Image (tube, rainbow, N blue to C red):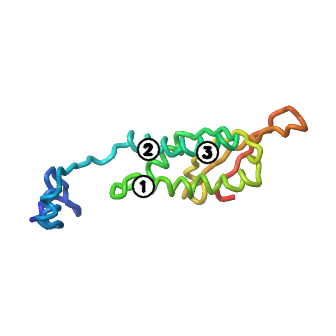
Amino acid sequence: MQKSVMGFTTQKQPGDEMADIKRLFTPEFRNRLDAIVSFKPLDEQIILRVVDKFLLQLEHQLGEKKVEVTFSDKLRKHLAAKGFDPAMGARPMQRLIQDTIRRSLADELLFGRLVDGGRLEVDWDAEANEGKGDVILEITPLPKPEGNSEPAEPQQATASE
């Protein structure tokens, strides 16, 4: 029996889970369940905390390579919007961070300006890449130990370079 609502989707009501469980599982299996726990959808603040958790992991990994990193609020909000799926939760977040930030940093860490460490600012430009958006990396490499003592000028890079 379907509840009727306006629009194209069905409205979930408390207790709908039990009807789904009865439909999907045999009585023998249902009798083995101790409890049924319903979860509310995650709100924006919780999703931002999940983003911060993943970015903190990345910050720690970069810290081991002597790279000090900061992430902009625009980037955090973009990751929260694109890395969360109501059906899958925050599972796609790690893949999004891999595709947007880590891939952009790989060459810089291995062969580029961050080989010896440095300072990195990561931002999001929604207008770049023909309106699709792109990650902006502002990189300030550490000065070379044998040469000049002035810090190098920050240089900007995008993920599509």
- Dot label at residue 61: 3
Single out the mark in the foreground, 3 or 2: 3
The mark nearer the N terminus, 1 or 3, is: 3
User: Where does the image place residue 112, in percent across and percent down from the top left?
Assistant: 76, 52
Q: Label 3: state its secondary structure.
A: helix
Crowdedness of circle 1 by 10 Å Cα count: few (<14), some, many (20+)? few
The residue under the point 18% across, 50% down is: 35
Q: Quadrant of residue 118?
A: top right
Give the residue type that dot 1 points to: Arg
Looking at the image, which residue is at 73% across and 54% down? 110
Q: CA distance from mark 1 to mark 2?
A: 10 Å
- The quadrant of the image that shows the C terminus is bottom right
Say above or below: 158 vs 56: below
Q: Are marks 1 and 2 in contact (CB under 8 Å)?
A: no
Q: Look at mark 2 in the image and give the residue it sits on.
A: 50
Amino acid tagged 3: Gln
How many numbered marks does the figure carry?
Answer: 3
Marks 1/3 in contact by CB < 8 Å: the verdict is: no
Which residue extends farthest left? Answer: 1
Q: Residue at x 85, y 40 (%)?
A: 144
* Near-viewer residue (86 or 37): 37
Q: Mark 1 highlights which residue?
A: 91
CA gap between label 3 and label 2 equals 17 Å
Quadrant where the N terminus sits is bottom left
> In the image, is 136 to the left or to the right of 117?
left
| Callout 1 secondary element | loop
For marks 3 and 2, the one nearer the N-term is 2
Name the residue rendered at 48%, 42% in the picture: 53
Please provide percent x and percent y for residue 129: 60, 58
Image position, residue 124 (x, y; %): 57, 47
